[in-house]
Image (cartoon, rainbow, N blue to C red):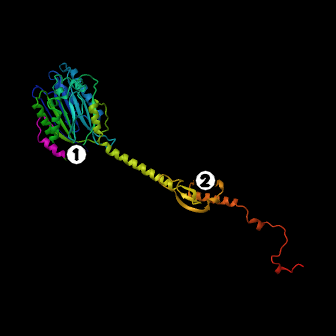
Amino acid sequence: MTTLRWGGVTDIGRVRTANQDSFFAEETLFAVADGMGGHAAGEVASSVAIGVFEGATVTGTKDLVALIQAANRAVLDRADQNNELAGMGTTLCSIALVHDETDPGEADHMAIANVGDSRVYLLHDGALTQITTDHSLVEDLVREGRLTAGEARQHPKRNILTRVLGNEPNLDVDSWDVLCRRGDRFLLCSDGLFNEVDDDRIASVLRRLEPPEEAARELLRLANEGGGRDNITVVVVDVVDDGGVSESASAALADSPSTLSSGSAPHDTTSSPNDHVSSAPARTGTRTHRRARSHLPTWRAGLFVLVVLGLLGAAFFSIRWFADNSYYVGVDDGEVTIFRGRPGGVLWIDPKIEEGTGLNLADVPVARRDAIRTGRQQSSLESARAYIANIEDLIESQKPPTTAPTTTTTSPSPTIPVNPLVTGPPVT
Ligand code: CA
């Protein structure tokens, strides 16, 4: 059973006068929202969006996408109710642990979705991958090759987003479905982190600090150290086994300031299969899915080998059976002979002499000789014997009547004494 352990932190940073970020972390569902808008609107937008996550149940990627779309409607509705909130918006990135009940042999998955430029990263085997793709102007420029990632972090228009919650009723949500394994570490964050701390340093912290709340706080510290020009939110979610649950949870509870939350919860296995609803740009999507499938070849290859071996075995035994249960009447050294096997053999299996018949091919009627020379196939040993018996009858019936005249045919003739000396007196 997959268990998660997490630590989350949000901070105003060193420049802003309000924290417009919000985050949600509970059991198997996590989200980060980065609000925008004048006055207190940004705070309202992110908190309204995050509020939709309270008590929500996500059993698949589709659910997660629907949840973000519901959050979008909630933000729009709230803005409609208050003119001062008009134009407010928020980013939202989220992950949810889901279990595919249709495939019990399959591991749990993390449903991932985002809108805007808050990010989800995955640390797997020490390597950090950005899973989500920012919906921002600078991301478009990076994708077009007009900016490097480093230049994007410093770009004056880096805050301009191309897609947010609170803008229009029909919202496109990018989503992913990522296999998660013990030891994987997910990071959700607002741009206040990655605009101040580059990916290499983020990866270094995530590799170095094991407790998720400790890693989250260290990343926050580095973001403030790097300038803290924006609000900073960091949520670190670890995939752990049951053994690590209680100790990490108690450690986290014993040391949690007001901005920090952490905990752990077992995954509810009553969820349903997840769907991959929409695919984000190919770069990260492709990498994600390649990774997600990386363990599958192990059992698929094994199954393939087993199937091939099974087929080869079945073929071998079929050929063996075919060869062992076939008979034909042929010739061995001039004698008509019953063979087991097929004339000329089957693959590597040569025919064997089953029994001789004592019948010379030369005695067989000419019309039958060619069939016997090439091997007259029979369905069974009995039918081979019957075939021989038939030929013997034929031979017998065609024999010339060599003895019959001396025994059966009589013609009137005078009795000639064999020994005149004995049988009668000499003729005079
Ligand atoms: Ca921000």
Horizontally, residue 92 falls left or right of residue 253, namely right
Determine the residue positioned at 11% across, 33% down.
222
* Residue nearest the viewer, comparing 112 with 29: 112
Q: Quadrant of the C terminus?
A: bottom right
CB at disc 1 and ligand 1 closer than 8 Å: no
> Which of disc 2 and disc 1 is earlier in sequence?
1
Residue 2 disc label: none
Q: Nearer the viewer, residue 233 or 86?
A: 233
Q: Secondary structure at mark 2?
A: helix
Residue 218 at x, y percent in the picture = 12, 36
**Does the magenta run of residues contain 77?**
no
Q: Quadrant of the N terminus?
A: top left
Displayed quadrant of residue 104: top left
Instruction: Identify the residue under disc 2.
Output: 371
Circle 2 residues within 10 Å: few <14, some 14–19, many ≥20 = few
- Residue range (magenta): 244-261
How many angstroms separate mark 1 from mark 2 (CA)?
Answer: 75 Å
Residue at 61% from the left image edge and 53% from the top image edge: 370
Circles 1 and 2: CB atoms closer than 8 Å? no
- Secondary structure beneath dot 1 equals loop
Q: Amino acid at mark 1?
A: Asp
Q: Is residue 104 in view?
A: no
Tag 1 residue: 241
Name the spot of residue 340 as percent of width and height, x first.
53, 57
Residue 391 locus on image (x, y percent): 64, 58
Residue 250 placement: quadrant:
top left
Q: Amino acid at mark 2?
A: Ala
Circle 1 residues within 10 Å: few <14, some 14–19, many ≥20: some
Q: Is residue 186 above or below residue 72?
A: below
